[in-house]
Image: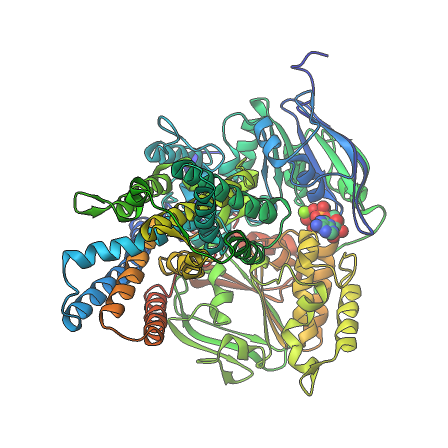
Amino acid sequence: MPGSDVAEARIPDRGMSPASGDDEARAVASQLRRERLLLLLRGQTLGALLVVLIVVFSLIAPNFFSSDTFFLVGGVAAAMGIMAVAQTFLIIAGGIDVSVGGVVALSAVLTGVLVDHSVPVWWAAAIALLASALLGGVNGFLAIKLKMSPLIVTLATLSLFTGLAYVLSGGDTLLISSDSFEFIGTGKVGPFPFQMVIFAVVLAIGYFYQRFSIHGQQIYAIGGNVEAARLSGIRVDAIPFVLYVLSGLSAGMAGLILTAQLASASPDVGSAFLLPVVTAVVLGGASLHGGLGSVIGTLVAVAILGVLQIGLSLLALSAYVQDMALGIVLLLALSLDQLMVKERSTS
Amino acid sequence: MSAADAPVLELTGLQKSYGATRALVDVSVSLGRGETIALVGENGAGKSTLAKIACGLVKPDEGTITVGGEAMSSYSALAAHAAGVRIVPQEVLLCPNLSVAENITLGGVPRKRGNVIDRRAMTEAAEQRLADLGIESLDVRRSAGRLSVVQKAVVQVARALIPGTRVMIVDEPTAPMSKAEVDELMRLLELVSDRGVGVLYVSHRLDEVLRLADRVVVLRDGHAVAELEAAGLTEPQLISAMAGGRDFTVHATREQRVTGEALAVTDLQGPTIDHLSFSVGWGEIVGFYGIASSGRDDLGALLTGVVEPEGGEVTVDGRSLTGVSVRNRIHHGIGYVPPERSAALLLGRSVRENISVAMLERLTERGLKKVQAERELASHWVQELSIKTASIEAPVRSLSGGSQQKVLLARWLAAGVRVLILEEPTRGVDIATKAEIYRLLREFADAGNAILIASSDIEDILAVADRSIVLRDGRIADTFQSTTDVESLRDSLLTAAIAEGVEHARV
Ligand SMILES: Nc1ncnc2c1ncn2[C@@H]1O[C@H](COP(=O)(O)OP(=O)(O)OP(=O)(O)O)[C@@H](O)[C@H]1O
Ligand SMILES: [Mg+2]
């Protein structure tokens, strides 16, 4: 059979047809351009929202537009951002970890208790980090090996870890006085708060990992279609397990940062992180069905949440009004996004 | 026996039961280097189960698996992949969120130093593998979720072609493919087996089987009932081995009484449809045939409103459908079986729910579902269409591919729609079931209902259509009445479907 005839005959549909020529090629090209544009726009709705928020707060809150605010936002966003980067990968892979608040509390309390028992503070911190990673591993084991729903598993462990933190500390706040340790929470590198530097490093690693590493792509594959990934020889159990461990580790880091900031360990620190971490990741474009999301999207979302928090508190609104404003902005952001990307590919 | 002569894949004494269903009963297959074994049998015979066991996706209850002479003690998909066993599965398994290139190279991503992806090499490798398949102009940067059914199949085949392959299992890859694509795939599999890869080929198309296979293993109800040398084997012999004495010849043309216009389409326009007008009468079956870019693929979605038409009007029984939601079209009496069945089935839900889902409102009394009536309805249709399932409560996901297709058909027959639009109604369906589906469709039309079939399988059109419309470039190329001279009708359809100068396309 002459090869050229076969090529002529195979006209499966738009995307593949060679014969009907330029029109087809142009159609495909324009389709591609549209997909790209939509993706770009998706990123930019968020970016635009961030800019609008900054402009609005600058106008109505006199002290808002300053480098101080920048560092303030960076400071509050760092702990959440570190966790959000790890959570981004987990959610892309089709998992979720809502127990981070509990791990934050445990990591803080554990450090405090160990220091109380005169363990050197850096040793205590290292042990707390290790324990946090272990707790992440527990989540991973339950969700993956025992095939339990990750949402339920981590809701349960959230309750467990938080309770444990209160039991360990007896509900007390434990003081930690160590200048070198406090540097993590209050120190500066040049003008930058040290915690912001940690966040930047985590972010850079995460970005590189997502964009360029083979594991990065495999995570998308697992979230996109786990059976397809399995058949391609991808470790569909081991990779998400590591992501749970990393999520635990990131929460441990956040716990240390907050402890250092306050120079004391309290089981209450975790409560602020019940939902914002997952919120940031989803706002940043990840899908709870898995397969979608990006570190940069998460970064922008974390910045939006940080700006909102600082901006609203500069306006001296009551905490309840702040909560309402936060909810409204989130709904606005998500619906805008949905409008822009109405024709996203169905999975 | 030296290692080189050892079978690349040896399955011995495989047993697999799902509850009361015995999917495989003591089946053994030994695949040599460069050998091609075809696996045939009717829907639910156990072919896919065997394929899944061979590639580590399913653990057998009993039996041993040897790859390249090495007994695999703990066999998993990971171990299978590492040992060089690849599968092109029956249902599309792609990552819709990744690009074509990423999907194709999923099992072996080209890397620079460390773990860094080499994107350029990835694109080139993907393009190269598509070129091996004779596909040149599929843009590998497109996202896989947006491909057509055929394109997805091609991507899956391309993905299995990575270096290090010893065994290639192909489970009905050609169901959605055109003749030309099938030819390319055959050529490719021959090439692969020439290089020493063992091929396990599952298909309902016996011409393919006879052409490709060295040996044919026939499965029936989980038993390997025959193992035949392919040389000298004929289709009728093979059919009788599969059927075990049953008869499934397709009925001759029927007496038809068309009364009035059921479906009228005027000036319909869509992405690939160009000012199309036609009508289908009550009691009539109209078949649409054409190559894949002819507009045949898009017709059903446009008629049912799944894709918004760019212009024109569709009326059912004199009532216009313009502006009617997809949901309300059911109330106008339209049922739609789309080409990709996984898109229409609730895979995780039971057979019962899948059958009753389109008529729940009628099964409801004062806000409560009539549970008993629903069960009876489901049982009735399971029996009527002889759907092979452990029970009506089994999830549809657990059914074999062909049985899933029947569930979809049952849904609309049960809902009592009067106009049925079907695309690829017999994709992945065995010969016996095909004949059954044809019979059901005829009965449905004889009862005064209207049917529109769009299919890439010319047998569908020849077997049931009273009138065949051939599409080319989105327009009607020609129309034929059914006749007893099937062969000349076949020729006419084929000729009309293909533009001048192109000889090899069938679809
Ligand atoms: N996961 C499962 N749970 C329950 N039953 C199953 C499952 N998988 C397969 N079965 C049953 O095992 C039998 C064999 O199914 P299998 O998919 O192997 O058939 P097949 O020969 O591939 O058919 P087809 O030609 O329709 O694809 C069927 O009766 C099916 O319902
Ligand atoms: Mg099958």
- A114 or A223: nearer the viewer: A114
Residue B179 visible (yes or no)? no
How is colour applied across the structure in the image?
rainbow
The answer to which quarter of the image holds residue B186 is: top right
Q: Which residue is drawn at 71% across and 63% down?
A: B351
Which quadrant of the rendered structure holds the N terminus of chain B? top right
- Point out residue A339 in the picture as x, y percentages from the top left corner: 34, 69
Q: Which residue is drawn at 77% across and 56% down?
A: B388
Indicate left or right for B53 with A130 as reference. right
Indicate left or right for B110 with B413 as reference. left
- B351 or A4: nearer the viewer: B351
- Point out residue A122 in the picture as x, y percentages from the top left corner: 39, 37
Measured along the vertical axis of the image, is residue A155 above or below residue A238? Answer: below
- A12 or B43: nearer the viewer: B43
The residue lying furthest to the top in this view is B2
**Number of numbered discs present?**
0
The residue lying furthest to the bottom in this view is B366
Measured along the vertical axis of the image, is residue B6 above or below residue B184? Answer: above
- Point out residue B287 in the picture as x, y percentages from the top left corner: 57, 64
Indicate left or right for B207 with A297 as reference. right
The residue lying furthest to the right in this view is B245
- Point out residue B251 in the picture as x, y percentages from the top left corner: 74, 60
Q: Residue at x 34, y 36 (%)?
A: B119
Residue A330 visible (yes or no)? yes
